[in-house]
Amino acid sequence: MQDYSFPRAVCRSLSELFMSYIDLYFSSQRKEGQIIFHGVSKDVPPGVPVNEMNLVSVIITIYDPEDCKVKNQRELLDKRIMRISNEAHTQGALLTQADIAILLGESTKTISRHIEALEENGELVPTRGKWKDIGPGVSHKKRILELYLKGYEYTEIERKTQHSGEAIMRYVKDFARILVLTEEGFEDEELRIITGLSEKTIQEYKELIETYSTEEYQERLDQLHSIFGKKEISRMNTETGPKNSSGRWRR
């Protein structure tokens, strides 16, 4: 480093980068059955060209001795899908269904079918498509809120979805706002402006409201009303002006 006259801070950064590279690729931190895979960083937003995506090096467990105890092929594939997608997510990457198919030697159609079945059973597989709401599938927000409405506690939802408690609470608060404002007669365009949520998200939330507005889920709905209730409506009317008889804002 001295030969190049780098500042100390640069030398320190380069040394740390070099050591992390050595540790990842040549140390004993990788176990038998693990490989290094370069996945798309979970910070990369939708719409970024593939050649511009930031990749993250992650350690993926293709084989674990516990796999031998699984009863059948279907359960084994489910377990492996959950394991490698969660490992990548924990290390800062999001696998696509194509990534999972390549890593596990299966077709994308098979992987898609297994992920759909897992999610129908309340599991949330952290793929790039789900986390970034890419494509026509059900978003991760909707899956999380379904678990909440069904009575799962925050700690259980965290475990099932690999989301932080803060993120889950944020989704619950947004959903509570849509619930109360919809009951107050606000139109979709007004909901979008007031909440800052996308049209797709608003429609998903309204579908949830329609599905779960039954006596069975009344306790959860009451909790949501307490999160975003009449006081918030009054505050909004004070700041923006009340709605007139046609349901539009007065100016």
Image (spheres, rainbow, N blue to C red):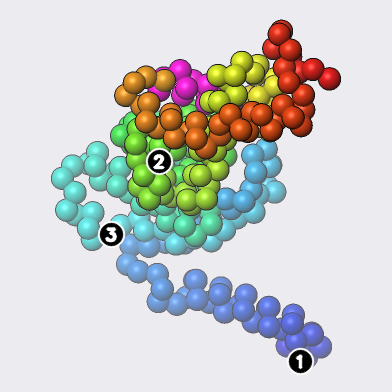
Q: Which quadrant does the N terminus fall into?
A: bottom right
Considering the numbered disc 1 on the image, is that residue within a helix, a strand or a loop? helix
Q: Which residue is found at the position 64% from the left and 82% from the top? A: 15
Q: Nearer the viewer, residue 153 or 207?
A: 153
Crowd around label 3: few <14 · some 14–19 · many ≥20 (10 Å): few
Q: Who comes first in sequence, dot 2 or dot 1?
A: 1
Depth-wise, is mark 3 or mark 2 nearer the camera?
2
Considering the numbered disc 3 on the image, is that residue within a helix, a strand or a loop? loop
In this view, 246 is above or below 224: above
* Residue occupying the far right of the picture: 251
Quickly name the residue at label 3.
Answer: 64
Percent x, y for residue 4? 79, 86
Q: Which quadrant does the C terminus fall into?
A: top right
Q: Nearer the viewer, residue 243 or 6?
A: 243
Residue 124 is marked as: 2
Relative horizontal placement of residue 222, taking residue 228 as reference (left or right): left
Relative horizontal placement of residue 37, taking residue 186 as reference (left or right): left
Quickly name the residue at label 1.
Answer: 2
What amino acid type should be assigned to the residue bearing mark 3? Asp
What amino acid type should be assigned to the residue bearing mark 2? Leu
Percent x, y for residue 189? 69, 20
